[in-house]
Amino acid sequence: MLKPTKRELRINHLEEVRDKEEAKKSNLQRKTKIRTLQFEWSDGREVGCNDVEVLEGLEPHPNMEGIRIENYLGEKFPPWLLMMKIPSDGDSSRVFDNLVAYVADSPVDEGGETVVFSCLEEFTIEECPLLTKIPLSDCSSLVKLRIEDCEELSYLFDELHSFPSLKDISIGGCSKLTSLPSELKSFTSLEGLQIYRCEALTSVPEYFSELHSLRGLQITECQSLSYFPKNILGGLTRLRFLEIGGFSEELDSFPYLNSIQDLPSLEFLAIYGDARGRIKSLPDQLQSLTTLKGLHIHFFNGMEALPEWLGNLSSLKSLGLWDCDNLKYLPTATAMRLLSKLTRLRIGGCPFLRENCTKGSGSEWSKISHLPDIVIQETGLRRV
């Protein structure tokens, strides 16, 4: 059950622990050299009979730096985990002053409680389908926040001003999240923002254009998104990495890309079409990106050929084509030769193009045979 590696300790098969008293025998409060803990219950269980009391008995010493919890089926977290001040013997209390990373991978209902850690830097919540709000507040040191596959989560925070140091936010697979809080605009130090697979999200706020510190932005696979102000991207002059698209039919003409030419630092772009095949070609706005170094194209199932103007992207070094089910042809050999800096090509999940790019015999092979780094694979990046 115990698997220590110097400063880290992993405890698995916790469903086999009888009760709180047996869990206490691990004596984690006295294992002061341990800095990172991972608690694991086996996957596939339907009921967590004693998960709460077992986790309660696993209370560690207060100088932990990282805690990860997987497949926990308890309806709530024990007091030592929920509160910064942790009850101990007598009237004293202890504080997790050194905790810098916390990960929960459990379908837990936080029951209105919040987690408060004074030095927390990273906080991750994954696959918590009963979670309705983020159980976190007053973390002035929080730098990175990741929330994924929390199906009941409908809003993020009550008080975003409690996180002045946030630099990276990632939100994905939250199917009931309909809007983003206006307080996000106060995050002047935010460098990375990822929003993906949030099917109920309908709009991108105007204030996104004020996030001037952003270097990476992803907004993808939000099928209900119908409002994306045209001027937002033009205000993000430090943006280096952009992943965008996969929205509602109202945005099939990519109006939000009208100011993309105003991004002097943009190096990598991943553009998403639609899996249903409505969109027949790449957005024309991309023609102006002559300094772009990497381009990945996803889910353009209505497109049969890449446009001739792709040859204008003279700085392109890497090209990826993913899950474009009906894509058959690259640009002409003349256009491909204009991509003199292109060295890396990835093709995955594009059945017709994959066949046409068969080494030596495919109709498109001669256009790419000079490239030193080619990977063509049957599977793409499509989620099963």
Image: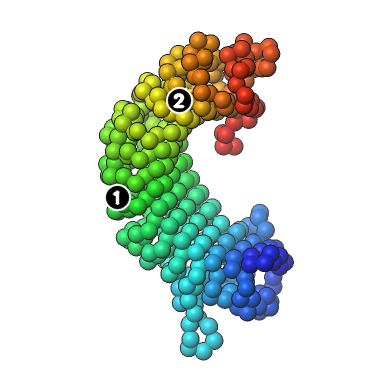
Q: Secondary structure at mark 2?
A: loop
Residue at 57% in and 34% down: 381
Front residue (pair 45, 209): 209
Quadrant, the N terminus: bottom right
Front residue (pair 165, 220): 165
Q: Is residue 145 left or right of residue 185?
A: right
- Determine whether 123 is above or below 176 in the image: below
In the picture of the structure, the residue carrying the numbered disc 2 is 315
Q: Secondary structure at mark 1?
A: helix
Quadrant of res 221:
top left
Residue at 29% in and 50% down: 185
Query: What residue type is disc 2 on?
Result: Ser
Residue 213: in sight, yes or no?
Answer: yes
* Image location of residue 73, percent across then percent down: 58, 62
Residue 349: in sight, yes or no?
Answer: no
Within 10 Å of disc 2 (Cα), the crowding (few <14, some 14-19, many 20+) is: some
Disc 1 from disc 2: Cα separation: 33 Å
Residue at 45% in and 13% down: 308
Quadrant of res 112:
bottom left
Which circle's residue, 1 or 2, is located before the other in the chain? 1
Q: Residue furthest front?
A: 340
Within 10 Å of disc 1 (Cα), the crowding (few <14, some 14-19, many 20+) is: some
Name the disc covering residue 198, or none: none
* Image location of residue 10, percent across then percent down: 66, 64
Quadrant of res 14:
bottom right
Quadrant, the C terminus: top right
Q: Which label lies toward us, 1 or 2?
A: 2
In the picture of the structure, the residue carrying the numbered disc 1 is 185
Query: What residue type is disc 1 on?
Result: Lys
